[in-house]
Image: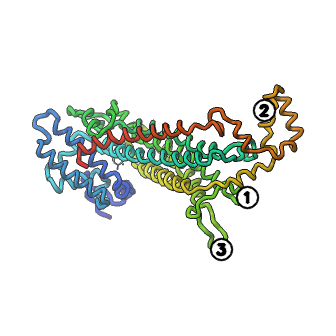
Amino acid sequence: MKTDTKTVVGAIDPDVLSFTVGEDPVLDLRLAQWDCYGTAAHVTMLTAMDVTPRIFTAEERDAILKKLADIRDTARAGSFVITDADQDCHLAIERNLTEALGPLGRRVHTGRSRNDQVATAVRLFTRDELLGTMSETVALAERLIGFAEKNREIPMVGRTHLQPAMPSSVGVWASAFGEELLDTLGILKAAYEYTDKCPLGSAASYGVPLPIDRKLTARLLGFREPIHNVLAAGNARGKMESIVISALQQVMLTLSRLAQDLILFSMPEFGYFSIPKEFCTGSSIMPQKYNPDVCELLRSKAAQVCALATGVAGIVEAMPGGYNRDLQDTKKLLMEALDTTRASLRIMARLVSGLRADPVRLRAAFEEPGVFATDRALELVARGMPFRDAYHQVRDHLEDLRGMDPDATIAKKTHEGAPFGLDFRLYANRIADGRKMIADFSEVVQKALSALLGA
Ligand code: ARG
């Protein structure tokens, strides 16, 4: 018979403890600093709460906040310790406060549950990570659009079904991915706004018989507002994670298709682009090899983020309302999805910075005359021929198209968004707007958090 392990919340069979604690002592190291802010807001609110006797005096509050700032710094430095008996960062922080401040530490959990506490810490963490993700998304979009602008006039065969379709340009190809990312930024923003509401004070999802001020704690943490209904606040855990990973999944879908195009168009058979050598790896047997491993792994990372999105949705979809321990397992999936997406965005931005277009190979790809067929048919239309007649005439004389000039052909495509109608000023404005949005969100967060617990 093993003896039970003593924890803050009672004695627990060691095997059960280790199974239920899972990876929390490691994963929660990333949440600990955020839980210090959540706890600081809660303690500040309890101090202001109109009850007799008061929970904390102003001096007691200051002593707790000082210790919380220390714990936060220790956590940031990577030296905070969570034991199995602590179970998670929340009880580890309570233990630290109690060790340092005795009875004060034992009052900190007044009027809250670990359920609203963890949901708050995860949201603070996610909000911060999403700000980083959004910046990295804009940075990659900017690189792609920069590459597009630099090579805007170089013709590139446009493809459907991977077959040559119509003359296009490197500008269209590259800025398409940039624009897709800028549009996806709107999805990330929606995920951010969903995350930017405070569950604190919902306690175990059913409120508490104390006059707590949930608007105050939300404001102290820089959240837009509290999640109003206490059960909605509890049930939103998992849903928030699912929404965020779905947004990340959208980023990864773009990265994966970009990676795939790069692999294809940098093959010797195409040679349109060259991926910088430092982003390729060699072979242990074939001396000539430079393999596009980074792009290949980006495809695989996208598949993994899709799996993580399915994983979280699976945990949440049939779960009954109120807290269930299943939710603990969403933390790892969320962190992994954020880490994977952010690392992918950063490596792709570096890769695109070093990407080179080969104008000779890009133009040589127009040798097969069929790619000009639609443009020729539309020339005939411009002279008055009905489109279907022009279509058949061109189809019957494809050889006549040989020698058409791709540069001249794409120069005629001047309408909005076409090779010579790309609006790089519009893109620059969208990039600047994106940056401004991120800076505005960050400012609100920074101001609130540094007022609460110092820089
Ligand atoms: N580590 C737990 C989690 O992430 C904290 C909440 C535990 N709550 C409970 N009722 N057991 O979900």
Write down the residue under mark 3.
Answer: 285
Is 376 in front, or is 71? 376
Q: In which image quadrant can residue 267 be found? A: bottom right
The amino acid type of the residue labelled 1 equals Glu
Question: x, y percentage for residue 198?
Answer: 33, 37
Q: Nearer the viewer, residue 347 or 273?
A: 273
| Circle 1 crowding by C-alpha within 10 Å: few under 14, some 14–19, many from 20 | few
Single out the mark in the foreground, 3 or 1: 1
For discs 2 and 3, the disc positioned in front in the rendered view: 2
Kindly identify which numbered label has been placed on residue 146: none
Which of pointers 1 and 2 indicates the residue nearer the eye?
2
Q: Please give the name of the residue rendered at 28% of the width and 41% of the height, measured from the top-left corner.
A: 447
317 or 349: nearer the eye?
349
Which dot marks residue 378?
A: 2
Q: Amino acid at mark 3?
A: Ile
* CA distance separating discs 1 and 2: 31 Å
Classify mark 1: helix, strand or loop. loop
Around disc 2, counting alpha carbons within 10 Å, would you say few (fewer than 14), some (14 to 19), or many (20 or more)? some
Which badge, 2 or 3, comes first in the chain's sequence? 3
Q: Quadrant of residue 293?
A: bottom right
Q: Are marks 2 and 3 in contact (CB under 8 Å)?
A: no
Q: Is residue 317 visible?
A: no
Identify the element where label 3 is drawn.
Answer: loop
Quickly name the residue at label 1.
Answer: 269
**Where, by quadrant of the figure, is residue 385 drawn?**
top right
Q: Is residue 68 left or right of residue 117?
A: left
Q: Amino acid at mark 2?
A: Leu
Q: Is mark 1 within 8 Å of ligand 1?
A: no
Q: Secondary structure at mark 2?
A: helix
